[in-house]
Image (cartoon, rainbow, N blue to C red):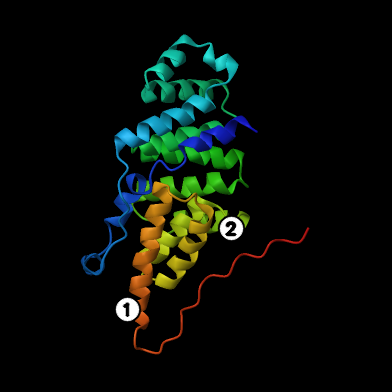
Amino acid sequence: MSLWFGVGAFVVVALVFLLVPLFRQKSALAGRQGDVRWPAVGVLGVLPALTVGLYIYLGAPAILKEQALTQAQSNYDVDGMVKALEDKLKATPNDPEGWYALGRAYIAFTRYADAEQALSKATTQAPQDARIIAQYAEAMALKQGSLDGRPLELVQQALEISYEETKALELAGLSAFQKENWAEALHYWRRLLKLLPKETEHHEAIAQAVQMAERKLDLRLGGTGMPMPAVPAEPRKAPH
């Protein structure tokens, strides 16, 4: 099991905590119709999870010998861990996993421009890693306040690499929902639900989003006789 597998322990730095700025940009009309709002996790929940992830990533024997980092870990000093990771990447910049971890940490602290830069480096060094590409898309979207344009292109790129990339499915569903493409949003979010661990905040948040999209689709189709709108086809895998 690779060291990076542990960094996944700080996955879900929380949907809403990261994406609320995107939800709030809907028009007043869309706002009256309802919004996707996930339960906020809050800083007290995010920082310990983030600390665990950084602890594991930086927890190689050579790193653990550094007294400053050891103290940071024992005190749940996330700022200290981020600084340690920044210093590590200055010394060894060819580390896509390190840039990925740093980018996620920056997102947690709403440092979106820094997150975009860090994740751009990660993507350059690992251009076929769907997980990194999707996270880069999120950082870019948070910085510009919208998933439109390049962020959505990156989301689709990530899905072409892996149609089970959870962050990409999450963002693709969100983009479709914001455009009132309820069936498309359901397509992505239902697939995402199957991949998420049950009885977690992430699963619950997406389940709520699915229910809201289902209600909106029912309202659109109810009594009209309209056929179910088309949904995106799963990308075909290239033959070996």
| Above or below 140: residue 57 | above
Camera-nearest residue between 95 and 65: 65
Q: Position of residue 33 (x, y in %)?
A: 25, 69
Instruction: For marks 2 and 1, give the one nearer the viewer.
Output: 1
Within the image, what quadrant is residue 217 found in? bottom left
Query: Is residue 168 among what the camera can see?
Result: yes
Residue positioned 51% across, 41% down in the render? 120
Instruction: List the residue tagged with mark 2.
Output: 163
Within the image, what quadrant is residue 226 found in? bottom left
Q: Position of residue 4 (x, y in %)?
A: 58, 33
**Disc 2 residue type?**
Tyr
Instruction: List the residue tagged with mark 1.
Output: 219
Badge 2: residue crowd in 10 Å (few <14, some 14–19, many ≥20)? many
Rounded to the nearest whole Å, what is the CA distance between mark 2 and mark 1? 29 Å
| Above or below 94: residue 8 | below
Q: How many badges with numbers are in the image?
A: 2
In the displayed orientation, state which residue is furthest to the front: 199
Label whose residue precedes the other's in the sequence (2 or 1): 2
Quarter placement of the N terminus: top right
| Above or below 141: residue 32 | below
Q: Position of residue 197 (x, y in %)?
A: 49, 49
Quarter placement of the C terminus: bottom right
